[in-house]
Image (spheres, helix red, strand yellow):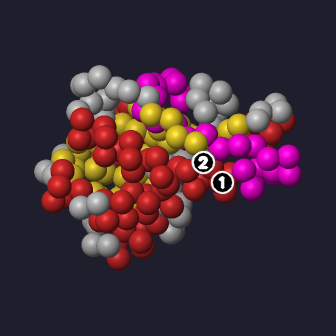
Amino acid sequence: MKNIVILISGGGSNMAAIVRAAEQQDWAGRHGIRIAAVLSNRADAGGLQFARERGIPTQVLDHKAYPSREAFDTALAEAVQAHDPALVVLAGFMRILTPAFVERFAGRLLNIHPSLLPAFTGLNTHQRAIDAGCKVAGCTVHEVTAELDVGPILEQAVVPVLPCDTAATLAARVLEQEHVIYPRAILAHLRDGAGGEKALCTSAS
């Protein structure tokens, strides 16, 4: 069985989309893939309750309880490794991971970013797209590397930027596409093998 460990910090809507896709498409039965655990750095993360209701093991590691970022990431890496992960999925995990953590799970660590990378790395992506006069925006599933938001791209979805858009309305439409492409990219990554040839798949809303 290929285990997925999902890291969250908040409501976990992308985590929920992944879990629902795994249930509806029978990842365990058809592909030998299961969601093994959901971990969070916040005890009040809303997504934890969703995971518990689905019978998925959860764990909280409060980053504020550790003396340094390195100490927290060391503890987090051990907690993740306890589930023997084939893949570690960042789903709204609001921590910048240390190079040591990223190196430990290199090739097995995915993230989704709310822009069409390589455009608009970092924060405030939707307002920056609007301010730049972009006609389209979107989201990107990518492998995580030590450099922020520049890892190999696995899948993207394109969303039009409407004349009446605010950052909030654009973010809501992009999030809908995140829920579509993240589960799909995860399944393809594990089913086809991380070492094989990767094809960029781009969808439009």
The disc placed on residue 103 is none
From the top left corner, tell me how far across and down residue 138 is, in percent: 62, 41
Which stretch appears magenta?
Answer: 146-170
Q: Is residue 160 magenta?
A: yes
Per the image, label 2 sits on a secondary structure element best described as loop
From the top left corner, tell me how far across and down residue 140 is, in percent: 53, 37
Determine whether 62 is above or below 102 in the image: below
Check disc 1: other Cα within 10 Å, few if <14, some if 14-19, many if 20+: some
From the top left corner, tell me how far across and down residue 194 is, in percent: 27, 30
Question: Dividing the picture into quarters, in which one does residue 117 lie?
Answer: top right
Q: Which residue is mark 1?
A: 173
Q: Residue at x 43, y 63 (%)?
A: 16
Q: Which residue is mark 2?
A: 205
Q: How many tags in the picture?
A: 2
Query: Residue 40: in sight, yes or no?
Result: no
Q: Residue at x 71, y 37 (%)?
A: 136
Question: Dividing the picture into quarters, in which one does residue 121 lie?
Answer: top right
Q: Residue at x 49, y 54 (%)?
A: 179
